[in-house]
Image: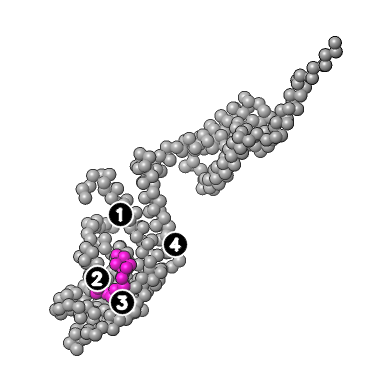
């Protein structure tokens, strides 16, 4: 038996919340893979990788949270746009609440013990 | 054309790195990859390999997104997720409410009230027993046959019993604890109904009571004074 203590880094945290982040950046505007990654990065998630975004989009699509449509582009390849479905919007609302409650709990936990922000 | 080759080559290597996945899951995962990588390639400069890193690393990252959550979630998993959400929200509400009343958690405060609940439970059981024995006269004390000393004695006995039960709760069998929980719910319902009735009776004394009072008082009523006769 051995145990591992993981240092919390953004990549580890991101794994758990990438679904939520992707749903959130699609809330107001549909987007295609590369564009979604750009939105995530410009929102401050610098560590997010292309494979994570692609894999997450596939999974959300298969779960019925996203729908897709192809838009022809004059120069370059067609682009596959993703849009939130009703189930996706519900999921965004639910997961958003869970995340906020969780984040608030962690904040309180750290605040109570004087851990610097 | 060179770009198409570059994408195809990259996809082949990613697929090779995921060879251990079940074929169906792998193909589902890779289905859109050529098209996606073509988009990526069209968006920026430089070879795909230098922009996305080696295919093996890309595959590892892709694999991680699958492991987080399988696409087809069962009803049980969905239910468990909902339950987990509810628990997190409940805990957050516990902390928020606690802060409002000056405790770390609202449940911390409620825990302090548990012995008080034991007392109340004893009282409620005494009332329930009194009610079962004597439905006619229901007040605020467990009067059986109208005797006050009996009422207080009964109250004390049931309260002590309830406290003892509270202190020995951990030692009870599972079914006994379950029975206790069900009884508690029944008692709370009984209490709400009982107190509402008593409050109603105090606020709105019924005509019957007024009539009874009059009848009771009748023998002592001053008889109409005889008319003066002279």
The reply to the same-chain question for discs 4 and 1 is: no
Q: CA distance from mark 3 to mark 1?
A: 31 Å
Under circle 1, the secondary element is helix
| Res A37 label | 2
- Considering the image in quadrants, where does the C terminus of chain B appear? top right
Residue A28: within the magenta?
Answer: yes
Under circle 4, the secondary element is helix
| Res B42 label | none
Q: Residue at x 26, y 60 (%)?
A: A13
What residue is shown with label 4?
Answer: B79
Residue B189 relative to residue B218: left or right: left
Residue pushed farthest top?
B230
- Asked if the residues shown at circle 2 and circle 4 are in contact, with their CB atoms under 8 angstroms apart, the answer is no
Q: CA distance from mark 3 to mark 4?
A: 31 Å
- Which of label 4 and label 1 is nearer to you? 1
Q: Residue at x 24, y 70 (%)?
A: A37
What residue is shown with label 3?
Answer: A81
The reply to the same-chain question for discs 3 and 1 is: yes
- Asked if the residues shown at circle 3 and circle 2 are in contact, with their CB atoms under 8 angstroms apart, the answer is no
Residue pushed farthest front?
B230
Q: Residues within 10 Å of mark 3 (few under 14, many from 20)?
A: some
- Asked if the residues shown at circle 2 and circle 1 are in contact, with their CB atoms under 8 angstroms apart, the answer is no
Residue B180: within the magenta?
Answer: no
Q: Residues within 10 Å of mark 2 (few under 14, many from 20)?
A: many
- Asked if the residues shown at circle 4 and circle 1 are in contact, with their CB atoms under 8 angstroms apart, the answer is no
Give the mark nearer the N terminus: 3 vs 1: 3
- Tell me which segment is drawn in magenta: A21-35
Return the chain for callout 3: A
Q: Residues within 10 Å of mark 1 (few under 14, many from 20)?
A: few
């Amino acid at each position: 038996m051995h145990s591992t203590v993981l240092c919390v880094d953004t990549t580890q945290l991101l794994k758990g919340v990438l679904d939520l982040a992707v749903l959130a950046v699609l809330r107001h505007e549909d987007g295609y893979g590369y564009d979604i990654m750009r939105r995530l990065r410009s929102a401050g998630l610098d560590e997010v990788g292309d494979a994570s975004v692609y894999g997450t989009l596939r999974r959300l699509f298969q779960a019925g949270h996203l729908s897709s449509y192809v838009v022809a582009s004059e120069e370059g390849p067609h682009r596959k746009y993703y849009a939130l479905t009703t189930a996706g919007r519900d999921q965004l609302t639910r997961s958003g609440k869970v995340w906020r409650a969780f984040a608030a709990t962690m904040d309180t936990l750290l605040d109570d013990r004087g851990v610097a922000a | 054309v060179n770009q198409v080759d570059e994408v195809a080559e990259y996809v082949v290597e990613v697929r090779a790195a995921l060879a251990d996945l079940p074929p169906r899951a792998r193909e589902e995962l890779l289905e859109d990859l050529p098209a996606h990588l073509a988009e990526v390639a069209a968006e920026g400069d430089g070879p795909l390999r230098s922009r996305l890193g080696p295919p093996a690393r890309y595959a590892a990252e892709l694999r991680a997104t699958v492991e987080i959550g399988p696409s087809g979630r069962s009803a049980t998993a969905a239910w468990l997720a909902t339950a987990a959400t509810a628990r997190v929200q409940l805990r957050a509400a516990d902390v928020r409410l606690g802060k409002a009343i000056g405790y770390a958690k609202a449940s911390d405060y409620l825990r302090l009230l548990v012995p008080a609940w034991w007392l109340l439970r004893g009282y409620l059981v005494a009332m329930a027993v009194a009610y079962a024995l004597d439905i006619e006269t229901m007040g605020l004390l467990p009067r059986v046959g109208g005797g006050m000393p009996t009422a207080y004695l009964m109250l004390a006995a049931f309260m002590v019993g309830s406290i003892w039960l509270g202190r020995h709760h951990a030692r009870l069998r599972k079914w006994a604890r379950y029975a206790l929980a069900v009884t508690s719910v029944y008692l709370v319902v009984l209490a709400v109904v009982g107190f509402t009735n008593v409050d109603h009776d105090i606020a709105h004394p019924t005509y019957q009571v007024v009539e009874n009072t009059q009848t009771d008082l009748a023998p002592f009523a001053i008889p109409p004074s005889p008319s003066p006769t002279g």
